[in-house]
Amino acid sequence: MSPSLPFIPPVTILTPLVTRVLGHNPGPYTLQGTNSYLIGSPKLARVLVDTTNRVPGLETYLCHLKSQLEQCLVGCPLSAIILTHWHPDHTEGISGVLDLVRQITLRNSSADSQLSVPVYKHPGGPDLSDMGFFNGPSEYLNDGQVIPIPAEEGDTRTIQLRVLFTPGHAEDHICLLMEDHSGQATAVFTGDAILGHGSTTVRNLPDFMRSLCRIRAISEGEVSPPTTGSDFVQPSRSFMLFPAHGQEVTDYRKRIDENIANRLNRISKTADFLSKNSHSVWIRESELLRAVYPEVPQPLRMAALLNLRHSLFWIASDSESLPSPVNFPRNSLIARISDGSERTIDVAEFYNLLDCFERSHNLEPEVTIEDVKHMLCTDWEWKFSA
């Protein structure tokens, strides 16, 4: 974890109905660690959003999670586990959590240990069992689907979670809009779409930008969440963002706008560098990277390089449905690998390489992870097409 990041305690009660449990897996991409969230009354079964990695901090995470789940006064302390997306820092801890829940349930009620806590995720992404992250069943969530949060009889603080499909960081990524009993939006659990500090990695930049714009529009009350129709009530004045990494965000407008502006600024810088060079000359990515990401530390260099390629393919295709700071002709850029082969790469192959890298253990026999790494890590060259 970077020493410049603010400290996050192992357990934080953010509101009477939202508790954050830190995943104890700090790193360049996870920041202080993965935040998982318990949502609902501590006395009742709660919903858990995300878990953590299997190593290094699963046992510490489970110890702190146990202290919270043991406050439950009914049999099973969890009503559901919801995954914002398939990545291992969110999913590898599921089995450990379910084992812990069985222990607490037996202690509370002496019930049959074969309890069923549903694990929810959006369709898409690799199979969690194939990846070795979680071998149990999972149920699919749909955009706009509502997950009720258990509440005590007569309690006026009832809440529910509404699924917002927000691909871009991952193809199955969702956010969760928290609504109170009147339908007023009070928070968004943003997963990895918006972090508490810095910016996230991107799997598909056009999808990601659309998702950011969607989160902003819903948080501002400019559009209704899916399936709510005209009954949607404006967001509350205390509206917050609860990210999967980093601190909670109270100034949500500023944070969302920073994320959108950051991506557009990187695209603009990339376009400026290209426009100052001859259109007939191949430009190496290492030159572009120094111009667009001069401050990137070495551990994040590969992530910056992939983000740069996303910006370049954005410029190459110029997604017309999205705000863009550039005005190049469509399909005006081409890329090739700088290994003497002069092999060109298009955006579809770029996405396929990313898929292969993420699912490296499932590669076809004729493709090796070394081949994929070579193609992704080798310096590419770019120039304007004739």
Image (cartoon, helix red, strand yellow):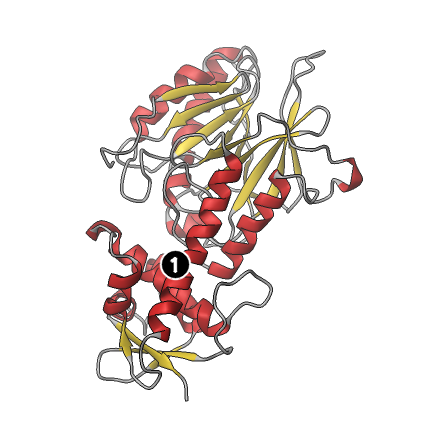
Q: Residue furthest front?
A: 276
Q: Quadrant of the C terminus?
A: bottom left
- Amino acid marked by disc 1: Arg
| Closest to the observer, 160 or 73 | 160
In this picture, residue 78 sits left or right of residue 312: right
* Whether residue 60 can be seen here: yes
Q: Which of the 4 image quarters holds residue 184?
A: top right
Q: Which of the 4 image quarters holds residue 24?
A: top left
| Closest to the observer, 185 or 294 | 294
Report the residue at 28% width, 31% height from top: 57
Residue 241 locus on image (x, y percent): 51, 33
| Closest to the observer, 115 or 124 | 124
In this picture, residue 42 sits left or right of residue 279: right
68 up-or-down from 334: above or below: above
* Number of numbered labels in the structure image: 1
* Whether residue 355 can be seen here: no
Report the residue at 51% width, 61% height from top: 206
Question: The residue tagged with tag 1: helix, strand or loop?
Answer: helix
Q: Which residue is mark 1?
A: 266
189 up-or-down from 131: above or below: above
127 up-or-down from 36: above or below: below
Q: Residue furthest left?
A: 298
Report the residue at 36% width, 66% height from top: 270
| Closest to the observer, 272 or 234 | 272
Residue 171 locus on image (x, y percent): 50, 55
Residue 78 locus on image (x, y percent): 53, 24
194 up-or-down from 111: above or below: below
Residue 264 locus on image (x, y percent): 45, 57
Q: Quadrant of the N terminus?
A: top left
Neighbor class of circle 1 (other Cα within 10 Å; few <14, some 14-19, many 20+) is some
